Amino acid sequence: MTKQAWQAALADLITDPKELFVLLALSTDLLPAAYAAAEAFPLRVPRGFAARMTKGDPNDPLLRQVLPLDAELTTTVGYQRDPLQETKVNPLPGLLHKYHGRVLVTLTSVCAIHCRYCFRRYFPYQENNPGRLGWDKIMDYLHADDSISEVILSGGDPLAVNDGLLRQFSDLLSTIPHIKRLRLHTRLPVV
């Protein structure tokens, strides 16, 4: 079986700041800072996304979404690593239940693109990867609470998951009568 175009794109990401700088003809003045910030949160940019950026423009809006900068390493009073307080509403690995009537499921920690403004950059994905075996616990939780009518798949990016696994998960959700909506939080259509 050959890879689909999106899978091939994810297998060939730009992950080295120097490669991004060379590709976009950027001044290397910012390169040391880019490496330092990428050490804390890795660079991941699909080539198709980078191709839409203006060469030579360090202020290109698309570039600014993904360009690691030293400002990311600055500690600011009043800011925290878990701004949405998600670790407090995490009853099971891979499940966040913050709001009445809806839950968020993190099927994967993988994203197609690492947005520098990501509020989950410090999210403890190792402890929150439900894996295929954790799905049963998530389904039991959803079955037990008939006030939940909406499931949001997020992560990482739910569309980075194997198509077969995504179908299996959605098929399991379809057996729960009070689940009325399935939403996908994804960046893949833009990359």
Image (cartoon, grey):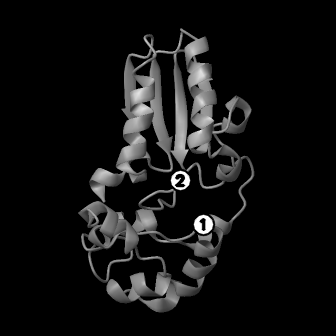
- Residue count near mark 1 (Cα–Cα under 10 Å), binned few <14, some 14–19, many ≥20: some
Of callouts 2 and 1, which one flags the residue occurring earlier in the amino acid sequence? Answer: 1
Residue at image mark 1: 41
Residue 126, numbered circle: none
- Rendered residue at 56%/15% (across/down): 143
As measured in the structure, the alpha-carbon distance from the residue carrying label 2 to the one carrying label 1 is 10 Å
Q: Which residue is mark 2?
A: 118
The residue at 33%/53% (across/down) is 188
Closest to the observer, 18 or 158: 158
Q: Amino acid at mark 2?
A: Cys
Disc 2 and disc 1 in contact, CB within 8 angstroms: yes
Q: Nearer the viewer, residue 70 or 107?
A: 107
Residue 95 placed where, x, y %? 61, 33
Residue 117 visible in image: yes
As drawn, is 146 to the left or to the right of 74? Answer: left
Residue visible at 43% across and 45% down in the picture: 158
As helix, strand or loop, the secondary structure at mark 2 comes to loop
- What percent of the width, then of the height, locates residue 141? 62, 21
Q: Is residue 45 left or right of residue 16?
A: left
Name the residue rendered at 45%, 35% in the picture: 169
Residue 58: image location, x then y, percent? 39, 76
Q: Amino acid at mark 1?
A: Phe
